């Protein structure tokens, strides 16, 4: 399957034009919209989301990932094989964490260019045709390139920031829960947040953190919007509080 | 076909992860997004929508319905066969009206559990695999259970409330139009609303009600947003006015 | 493939019900969402978008286009063959520019009516079944009708207005860039806008215009929302400034 991961939105004309290219060039391959609301223009936050979501998809999945504020500029297109899955996207760090977390990863600079390449929509003109080629079993049309040279190589293994706000107001962090002390207390929006297993374990209106269904630490509130309650936005820092179990401030 | 009915939104990561499971476990079965903006956390309002939309879908359709504020709590997963269609979802009333309105319905408590069940995303981990199994012709993996025991058994046959606001500001009620007197006058948002056949029958800016394309009484306004005009929200009451044809107030 | 172009939104129940009809009546034909956020009730603005997007889709594509404020009124359903593609939609001008720009176009008044035609949802009951028939290779079920008689025949070849705001705040005009002088200066929202090739060519926060990936002149700003910066809305006029290269005001 081809999995689309973008900040393009679904209702406007961008994802549909990419899918038309995919249907034409890789007929019969299922297309799945993973996210169309990745943090806009924020390849770094998006990289931690993509790396968290990808492993649950089947081996052989091709991820067409486009969060690309530099379109039309100097950054290069990349193909990456990581953990038995393929990724296509801009070399701006978006694919960095997916590559780093795999046991083995390979990268290619995509040197192929379409006959017609618009200045602003490489998702349709360049990345989608490459994704279709990979979905048909081909290799990235370009030259192997060291994984260590990918943009984002200097980013941390986990990102202590809010990377996504979902439609319910839950605030996803770039921290993997299994890398945190089990009883870790987080601090975000000026508030101490204790861990719970899920929403129904805490009182209504109480904010907490939990391991979400993709393994990330997520800040939520029972029957309330955590983003409003704590004033959280994408990019806000999340700290590991020094003194778990201390009295709240 | 598998029909998805949720309050998850399409752009975020939830529906896509469910669809990946469906593609993997029921390859080749068409997937249709019926609603991804069902009233959030409101299984009761959603139940009247689902019951109104389902009958127009083909026999054999499988509805994967998740509006599930109690995820991680005590409610059970259900499978329901009603009117030649199958439904999978939480036992919180969401499936109650679809079952009640069918000539014959059967229910199962789904006792199967996946090897990995997250605390917060049963749509992906539990309901989607069951829907895929049904789409392949299987039975709900569990024990038959009396329909009368389903949550929501005490809800009314029609719900005199606003159950949905669409993107145009039309306010859908939980009332079936063919159960109302033909010239019924409704009252909502403090206003008397007469029946029209459709938008172009009334003056611009005038609010009215009509039988929508799924048989529900819907409050609308010609070339205006009824929700703003009347100050309507999901859950607001709708009354059958006592004196049709009386002068407006 | 069947390409959906509407102002219905994707999350609500309308597009999904149309797709269910298409899956049932044209099984196996790919369905692509081109736009679900066409300017609401604005067939004129939408017509210039549809005409700009359609040519990049494969020959034989069937466009199911519904922006239909007059549903339930007197306007007729149309089928159009233009440039090797088929279009189905209301005769309110929505298909006019796609027909006009093709080297050869034919039109049909669709006289077929379904057994059950709701007053408010012709997209599902009438247009979708016709689109499915065309996708299976049939002709529009009706009578040939002169293209010159289509609504919108008196609209201009290019529309000097904002026809769409995308999710990033870019403002698409109804002007084809290749019909403008190469160094044309546009005026919108009281501001002079010079041409750039793409975003990264101008300073952050600077508004400009460029030829977008579908050949339309589009007003944008580097790392900012052009719609907010210039106070633009759909329908706002765009002028060709008299004195290119003059000093800014």
Image (spheres, coloured by chain):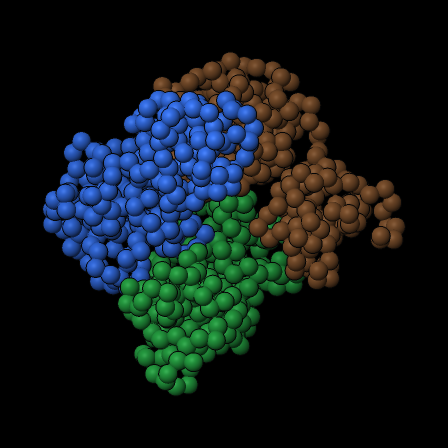
Chain colours: A brown, B green, C blue
Name the residue at 31% across, 67% down. Answer: B203
Name the residue at 61% across, 29% down. Answer: A98
Name the residue at 74% across, 41% down. Answer: A238
Give A211 or C202, whichever is nearer the viewer: C202
- Side (left or right) of A218 relative to C85: right
**Residue A248 sits above or below residue A90 on the image:** below
**Residue A247 sits above or below residue C99 on the image:** below
**Residue A225 sits above or below residue C163 on the image:** below
Q: Residue B71: x and y, percent? A: 62, 58
Q: Residue B78: x and y, percent? A: 53, 62
- Side (left or right) of A187 relative to B120: right
**Residue C162 found in image quarter:** top left
Give C160 or C10, whichever is nearer the viewer: C160
The number of callouts visible is 0
Name the residue at 46% across, 34% down. Answer: C191
**Residue C1 found in image quarter:** top left
Q: Is residue A84 visible?
A: no
Q: Residue B72: x and y, percent? A: 65, 57
- Side (left or right) of C155 relative to A236: left
**Residue A136 found in image quarter:** top left
Q: Is residue A244 visible?
A: yes
- Side (left or right) of A231 relative to C165: right
Q: Residue B60: x and y, percent? A: 37, 57
């Amino acid at each position: 399957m081809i999995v689309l991961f973008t900040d393009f939105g679904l209702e406007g004309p961008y994802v549909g034009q990419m899918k038309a290219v995919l249907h034409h060039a890789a007929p019969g391959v299922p297309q799945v919209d993973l996210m169309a609301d990745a943090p806009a223009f924020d390849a770094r936050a998006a990289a931690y989301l993509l790396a968290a979501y990808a492993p649950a998809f089947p081996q052989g999945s091709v991820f067409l990932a486009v969060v690309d504020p530099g379109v039309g500029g100097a950054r290069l297109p990349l193909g990456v094989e990581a953990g038995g899955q393929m990724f296509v996207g801009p070399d701006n760090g978006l694919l960095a964490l997916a590559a780093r977390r795999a046991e083995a990863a390979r990268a290619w600079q995509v040197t192929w260019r379409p006959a017609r390449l618009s200045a602003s929509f490489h998702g349709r003109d360049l990345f989608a045709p490459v994704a279709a080629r990979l979905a048909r079993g081909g290799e990235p049309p370009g030259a192997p390139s060291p994984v260590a040279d990918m943009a984002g190589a200097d980013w941390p293994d986990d990102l202590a920031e809010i990377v996504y706000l979902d439609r319910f107001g839950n605030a996803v962090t770039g921290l993997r829960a299994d890398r945190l002390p089990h009883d870790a207390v987080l601090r975000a929006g000026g508030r101490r947040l204790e861990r719970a297993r899920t929403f129904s374990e805490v009182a209504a209106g109480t904010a907490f953190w939990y391991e979400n269904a993709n393994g990330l630490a997520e800040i939520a509130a029972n029957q309330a919007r955590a983003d409003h309650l704590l004033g959280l936005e994408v990019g806000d820092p999340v700290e590991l509080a020094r003194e778990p179990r201390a009295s709240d401030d």
